[in-house]
Amino acid sequence: MIIVSPSNSRRFLHISCALVSRRWISNGYSCHTLFKPYTLNEAFDHFDHLLRGCTNSRQFKQVHAQIVLLGGLSTAFLSSTLVSVYGRFQRLCDAQRVFEAVPTECLLRNTIIWNSMLRANVMNGHCRETLEVYTRMRHLGVLADEFSFPLVVRACAKMGNRYSCALVHCHALRTGFHDNLHVANELLAAYGRLGQMALANQLFDEMLVRNHISWNTMVSGFAFNNNSNGALNIFQRMELDGWEPDLVTWTSLLSSHSRCGHHQETLRLYNVMRSKGIKATAESLAVVVSVCNDPNKGRELHGYVIRAGLENYSFAKNSLLCMYGRHSFLQAAECLFSEIETKSLESWNGLISSYTQLGLCDEAFSTFLELKKSEGNITPNVITWSDIISGFASKGRHEESLKLFRQMQVEKVRPNVVTISTMLSICADLSTIVYGKEIHCHAIRGLIDDNLLVGNGLINVYSKCGSLKEGHIVFKHIVNKDLCSWNTMIKGYGMHGFGESALKTFKQMVNDGYTPDGVTFVSLLSACSHAGLVSEGHEIFKKMKNEFGIEPEIEHYTCMVDLLGRGGLFQEASEVVKKMKIEPNVCVWGALLNSSRIQMQMQMQKQKKIDWDDGCVEKILKGSFRSGNYMLVSNMYAGSGRWEESAKVRVSARAQGLTKTPGQSWIELNKKVCIFTAGEFVESEMKEVEMVIKILSFEMKMKEGYIWHLGFE
């Protein structure tokens, strides 16, 4: 046992600290537990070494007890060290107790203890508490220094609090720390994180002194905000000013281009980086692999990862896993997943995404369940849920998607833009307005209703569910519309038979500087067809090529034939088919035949330019695996009284195993979708609905001139 007295105390402390410096903390600590420093003021200088050498909170607390016995809490240096180490051990309550025990006189004279408390809170994600400490600091008249401001600015950025960040910036400006390099760099990072790159640019231009961190922070800021041009401009400016881009600079530049979808440019920049002799890091390789669309190039990058000894970096392996899944190399993806010893959430998400991209919903769901049962503190996040929901939706399994979304709410996982957009697409497919409005409310509560992707989805769901007015309101409130916004609105008007409104919207779109694409003209021609605007449709079809340089495709010809056929202009429709520059497909012939069926005419077979039996019928049935095409031709024959030919077509369909899908209609009542199938018995509680349908059918015949045709049903 070591007995410490004033004569040998200094020697003991030196031995204790030496043991700590050699990481023999347990020995140093054991000696110190026998130490009774009842008269040693000089011991305070050595406690800092012991505190920083503690490997667990138990050791640390016992050293803390020794400091309390010595009255060491009255010194700012030891108190700040105690707060810092408690923060490192994530024991903020203990850190707060130490902080509160410091005498007010000590707090007023020393900024170091405040900085330790600020750092402990920021390090553990307690950003609001960081601002509270900073506010208290200012109220007591303690001036922040070059270490205080960066910590508070970082907390503001993590909270997404632009106002507080601007306020702290003003405080730094008034106290003269605005030009401090460390403070300025942290402000650059904060403005980048808050999406205020204009302010970051202004601050960067005003900086008197810059270092590599300043340049890299700007490039990273542009990358974070998906601005590849801004990142490239700063990069080029950096080189012109004589600074040599380092690994961090290159990685941020690559990331900015990959985020913007500039995959080829990302690969080109990677090759430039390698040609300059800069060794790729795991981070830069992960970025390049994520944009690689060539499986052979992907394998080449995988080989480089192995040769460089980077295969143990999880983010590089996760990126490779996603790349193999994206290119349908599922076995390679599964092999990589099994090789990862400590699987992160990104690893699980990568495998689940690989399954969903290949349409393997059940396998993805099984992996999802394994993730939920896995050991460790890993739980599915919004990306996991979104992948599973969209996977089921892509296979038409909407009910399962809805159930998963409900379960997601139960587990308190907040949906993001991708989740909401997927759910809106599901609601549009199901034509259920109640669920559509419910998802709209989720978007509002999540403050993402102003997102462009969500806005376009809302227009689509309201249009398809018969609420065109609500769709138009959403359309008007979208500030930065894109081409998809206009196309969706035009399509909505067309679906509801408002051809004039569709044309008016198109005119406004062109006047606002948007360039239409092929989808725009399909929607316009369809709108004209449904509204009977034959001359307007003709004009649009001409404008498409002559004014906008868009070559008509199958979809445009189909709409044009349908437009003319509905208008009774069968000769003109036939001419369109004859003059097509591409081979007509089943859709074009079907539109021509269907138009004739609607008008109850068989003029087509009398025309010499198109041979009904040998041309039209043969082409519409050749290679067709849709029962609807056979039923269409059969009904056409039946409508003209050619029963034998009609029967032959039906026999041919049955011989190929084709069966007619029963016609269905549905109505939504009290959040329940009631489906009616042709020829099906109607339940007793639906008799009232059946009566309404009969009344509507009667009014169609009597008021609108609907005429029954003689085809089979």
Image: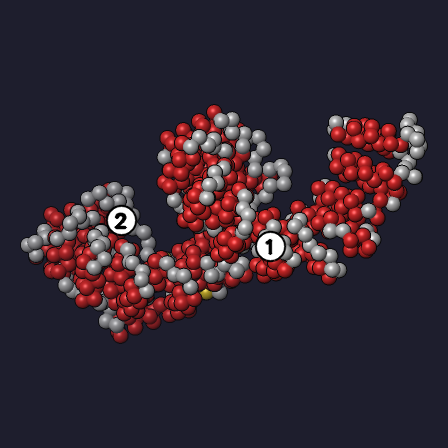
Q: Residue furthest top?
A: 307
As drawn, 523 above or below 473: above
Q: Nearer the viewer, residue 336 or 136?
A: 136
- Residue at disc 1, secondary structure: loop
Q: Amino acid at mark 1?
A: His
Which sits earlier in the primary sequence, circle 2 or circle 1?
1
Please state, as top left, top right, bottom left or bottom right, where the C terminus lies in the image.
bottom left
Tag shown at residue 37:
none
**In percent of the image, x 75 and y 34: which residue is there?**
53
Residue at label 1?
A: 178
Task: Give the structural element (helix, strand or loop) at label 2.
Answer: helix
Res. 609 image quadrant: bottom left
Q: Is residue 246 above or below residue 496?
A: above
Residue 84 appears in which quarter of the rendering? top right
Q: Report the residue at 24% width, 63% height from top.
A: 529
Check the picture and name the quadrant holding the N terminus.
top right
Q: Is residue 485 visible?
A: yes
Q: Position of residue 483 (x, y in %)?
A: 34, 58
| Residue 429, quarter of picture | bottom left
According to the picture, the residue beneath numbered tag 2 turns out to be 627
Residue nearest the viewer, comparing 531 with 706: 531
Query: Which-is-in-front pick, marks 2 and 1?
Result: 1
